[in-house]
Image (cartoon, rainbow, N blue to C red):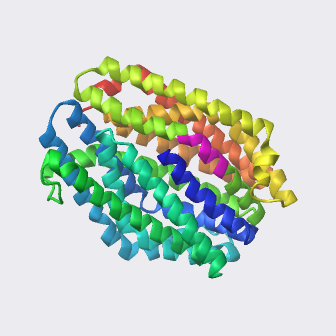
């Protein structure tokens, strides 16, 4: 349900932009992806707080829980210096993608406002990850749906009531994300200080920073490499034109719904694998990983059938433009080819992260994303259009998922330590 809320934010913004025009749909979608990618190294590293906290929970170590939660709260303060250089990073990334002057202008208008949410967004990420490591998924869910409601209400008011257009959508998101981060921090202190003691910002030791560098940094680099490659991939599609970009963004909104059960199972599998290893039960950890992967494959089958049976109906919810409809249906057809295997890969990747086996994920992602998907899309897109570009993504996802399955089956992750 938390993941559904996250997707609902993008779904709502895309619906609002659909009322403004095809250009706004594609430009805001591209800007959102760049905004998501820019702090991803830190955001994904902070998400590993769940791994450290869950390992301490499984080992029955309340002092370890308090210490690791406090360490990751302190690490989240990286959002403050990041805010100072974010506008420069953002502008450089958008210009590097070279999507065209019209798309670039709209994307920059949206993105320059959204960077203001970075500090509280990273603080909230650390707080929610600690809660997940302790087995609390209800509070993150409630905060996520509060984010959906506030964003939908304010963005609708600013876009259509105040006629702020793209800027209105950005301000609605900033207020909602900052409110979520502040509430997550307050609730973490209120809920867990009585049980674990003075939970607050601390100075990490050299040993703790070494553990974070060995486990959390590869996890952050993995997600950065993956999403960075996908951002570059969409930049390649943007060069085909705003219609091709809009069709891809709309199709990707529906693919995001398919990832909901996969990412949910990945997060919970990661936490439970770490907890089982903390309790010295590696066989239980293995059963958790395979069971999560099987559940994910079954749930992704539903979306696969929808993409194959009613693609035009789905795309038509966002746009009635004839060319957008035709291209969107083609993209959904390619996406249907990798939903099942992607679901398995996402969950087993989460299981490997929960075990602390993050360097293998980094190597496979770097090789597949930057040596296969990006060059493949660059070569296929000019020759076979948007469908050819998405075929390169299909090959990358297949390679990634099979590599994770082999690694988990090999059992080498059992030896990883934090």
Outermost residue to the top: 283
Above or below, comparing residue 45 to residue 397 in the picture? below
Query: Is 177 displayed left or right of 278 in the figure?
Result: right
Residue 381 locus on image (x, y percent): 73, 53
Residue 284 locus on image (x, y percent): 33, 19
| Count of numbered labels shown in the rendering | 0
Above or below, comparing residue 117 to residue 259 in the picture? below
Above or below, comparing residue 237 to residue 261 in the picture? below
Q: State the residue in front, 231 or 200.
A: 200
Check if residue 54 falls in the magenta segment: no
Q: Quadrant of residue 55?
A: top left
Q: State the residue in front, 346 or 230.
A: 346
Q: State the residue in front, 228 or 338.
A: 338
Q: Is any part of residue 95 visible from this angle?
A: no
| Residue at 73% from the left image edge and 37% from the top image edge | 306
Residue 307 locus on image (x, y percent): 74, 39
Query: Is 73 displayed left or right of 14 in the figure?
Result: left
Q: State the residue in front, 224 or 29.
A: 29
Query: Is 266 displayed left or right of 249 in the figure?
Result: left
| Residue at 54% from the left image edge and 30% from the top image edge | 296
Outermost residue to the right: 322
Query: Is 59 displayed left or right of 114 in the figure?
Result: left
Above or below, comparing residue 50 to residue 84 in the picture? above
Residue stretch in magenta:
253-260
Q: Is any part of residue 250 visible from this angle?
A: yes
| Residue at 47% from the left image edge and 35% from the top image edge | 265
**Which quarter of the rendering shows the C terminus?**
top left
Magenta stretch, main secondary structure class: helix
| Residue at 40% from the left image edge and 24% from the top image edge | 288
């Amino acid at each position: 349900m938390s993941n559904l809320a996250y997707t609902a934010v993008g779904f709502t913004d895309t619906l609002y932009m659909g009322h403004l025009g095809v250009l706004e749909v594609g430009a805001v979608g591209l800007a959102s992806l760049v905004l998501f990618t820019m702090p991803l190294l830190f955001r994904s590293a902070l998400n590993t707080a769940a791994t450290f906290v869950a390992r301490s929970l499984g080992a029955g170590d309340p002092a370890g829980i308090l210490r690791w939660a406090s360490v990751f709260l302190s690490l989240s303060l990286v959002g403050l210096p990041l805010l100072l250089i974010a506008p420069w990073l953002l502008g450089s990334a958008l210009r590097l993608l070279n999507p065209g002057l019209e798309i670039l202008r709209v994307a920059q208008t949206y993105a320059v406002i959204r960077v203001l949410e970075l500090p509280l967004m990273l603080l909230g990420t650390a707080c929610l990850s600690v809660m997940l490591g302790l087995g609390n998924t209800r509070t993150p869910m409630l905060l996520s749906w509060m984010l959906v409601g506030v964003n939908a209400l304010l963005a609708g008011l600013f876009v259509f009531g105040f006629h702020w257009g793209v800027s209105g959508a950005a301000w609605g998101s900033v207020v909602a994300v900052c409110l979520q981060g502040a509430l997550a921090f307050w609730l973490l202190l209120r809920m867990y200080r009585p049980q674990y003691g003075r939970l607050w910002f601390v100075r990490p030791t050299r040993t703790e920073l070494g553990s974070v560098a060995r486990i959390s940094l590869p996890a952050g680099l993995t997600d950065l490499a993956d999403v960075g490659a996908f951002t570059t991939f969409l930049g390649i599609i943007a060069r085909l034109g705003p219609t091709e970009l809009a069709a891809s963004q709309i199709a990707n909104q529906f693919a995001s719904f398919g990832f909901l059960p996969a990412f949910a199972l990945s997060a919970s599998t990661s936490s439970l694998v770490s907890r089982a290893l903390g309790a010295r039960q590696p066989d239980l950890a293995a059963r958790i990983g395979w069971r999560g992967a099987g559940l994910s494959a079954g749930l992704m089958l539903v979306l696969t059938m929808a993409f194959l049976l009613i693609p035009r109906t789905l795309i038509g919810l966002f746009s009635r433009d004839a060319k957008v409809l035709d291209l969107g249906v083609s993209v959904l057809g390619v996406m249907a080819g990798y939903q099942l295997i992607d679901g398995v890969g996402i969950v087993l990747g989460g299981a490997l992260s929960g075990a602390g086996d993050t360097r293998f994920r980094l190597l496979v992602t770097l090789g597949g994303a930057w040596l296969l998907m990006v060059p493949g899309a660059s070569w296929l897109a000019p020759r076979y259009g948007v469908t050819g570009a998405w075929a390169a993504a299909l090959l990358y996802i297949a390679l990634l998922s099979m590599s994770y399955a082999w690694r988990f089956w090999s059992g080498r992750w059992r030896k990883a330590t934090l």
